């Protein structure tokens, strides 16, 4: 299907992009990598008057070090994240998740910021960003504000980014030396996650000293398995010990039921994938 007609602008700066959004209000849509927006336009599920393309704004792209954190520009592609040593060294669970996204063609076009703002609960970057205690930098006419990942995802396809704002960067505290794993269950290659679990673990002397776990597609937003995290601290990094705690990974979740599986099936998957992810991250 062909999209309805729309105007197109590609401003070179964040300020000009914000001006375009202010001028057109809710009749404008932001284009980052286009992997989510373009199918929506083709199916005519949305018909904006103008598309604001962020692709020419260089300041929104790249990975840099900033003290005890790394900062990822919102239009940094998945491929650029995978190529960044800073991400693999200090936020390995994000790299592990991005490696599972679709195929190389999509990873060379899709952007981390576009995926986060689209906020599909089956998307693969929300859970690791949440588990890494990231902060999201949102820019509007009044300047920048920073929102914790725990407060960024508000509901299905809904985030803290306003219609007249842009997500401009993701700031991730360094998790240097932590093990990481992303366990994803799909029925066919390149599918959206039926369920996935991202874990980053710090082990001392064979015991789990710290652990952070993010759940994908177990509710209307990415979720943090906080109760499991707390229970795992001080636990031996063994299959038996981790299995016992991971059995409660689905508590407090509200997974969907669809053609890929019912809610109970997803709850079972969450326990299995949590055990696998934690053990893999711990080196077990």
Image (spheres, rainbow, N blue to C red):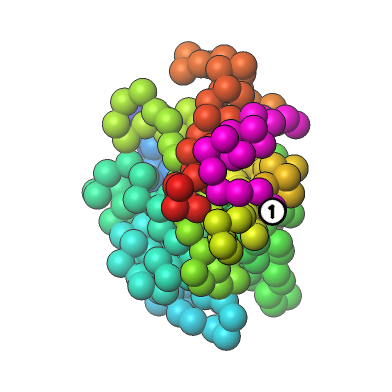
Say whether residue 216 is visible.
Answer: no
Left or right for 88, reference 66: left
**Furthest residue toward front:** 205
What residue do we see at 68% from left, 75% from top?
144
Query: Residue 204 falls in which quadrant of the image?
Result: bottom right
Left or right for 253, reference 272: right
Tag 1 secondary structure: loop
What residue do we see at 48% from left, 28% from top?
194
- Is residue 244 covered in magenta? yes
Q: Position of residue 153 (x, y in %)?
A: 67, 48
**Furthest residue toward left:** 105
Give the vertical position of 11 relative to 159 (above or below).
Answer: below
| Total numbered badges shown on the rendered structure | 1
- The main secondary structure of the magenta stretch is loop
Q: Name the foreground residue: 74 vs 7.
A: 74
Start and end of the magenta stretch? 233-252
- Is residue 122 covered in magenta? no
Residue that badge 1 annotates: 234
Left or right for 63, reference 167: left
Query: Residue 193 falls in which quadrant of the image?
Result: top left
Q: Position of residue 188 (x, y in %)?
A: 31, 26
What residue do we see at 61% from left, 49% from top?
236
């Amino acid at each position: 299907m062909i999209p309805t007609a729309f105007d197109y602008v590609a401003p070179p700066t964040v300020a000009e992009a914000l001006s375009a959004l202010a001028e057109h209000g809710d009749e404008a849509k932001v284009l980052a990598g286009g992997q989510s927006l373009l199918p929506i336009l083709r199916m005519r599920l949305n018909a904006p008057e103008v598309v604001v393309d962020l692709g020419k704004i260089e300041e929104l792209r790249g990975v840099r070090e900033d003290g005890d954190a790394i900062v990822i520009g919102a239009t940094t592609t998945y491929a650029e994240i995978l190529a960044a040593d800073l991400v693999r060294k200090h936020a390995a669970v994000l790299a592990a998740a991005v490696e599972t996204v679709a195929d190389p063609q999509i990873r060379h076009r899709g952007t981390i910021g576009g995926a986060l703002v689209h906020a599909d609960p089956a998307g693969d970057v929300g859970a690791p960003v949440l588990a890494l205690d990231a902060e999201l930098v949102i820019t509007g006419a009044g300047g920048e504000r920073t929102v914790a990942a725990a407060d960024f995802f508000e509901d299905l396809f809904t985030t803290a980014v306003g219609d007249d704002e842009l997500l401009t960067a993701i700031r991730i505290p360094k998790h240097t030396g932590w093990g990481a794993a992303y366990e994803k269950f799909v029925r066919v290659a390149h599918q959206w996650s039926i369920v996935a679990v991202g874990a980053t673990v710090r082990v001392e002397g064979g015991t789990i000293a710290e652990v952070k776990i993010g759940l994908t597609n177990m509710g209307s937003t990415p979720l943090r398995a906080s109760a499991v995290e707390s229970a795992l601290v001080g636990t031996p990094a063994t299959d038996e010990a981790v299995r016992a705690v991971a059995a409660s990974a689905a508590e407090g979740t509200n997974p969907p039921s669809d053609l890929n599986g019912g809610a109970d099936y997803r709850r079972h998957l969450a326990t299995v994938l949590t055990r696998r992810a934690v053990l893999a991250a711990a080196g077990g």
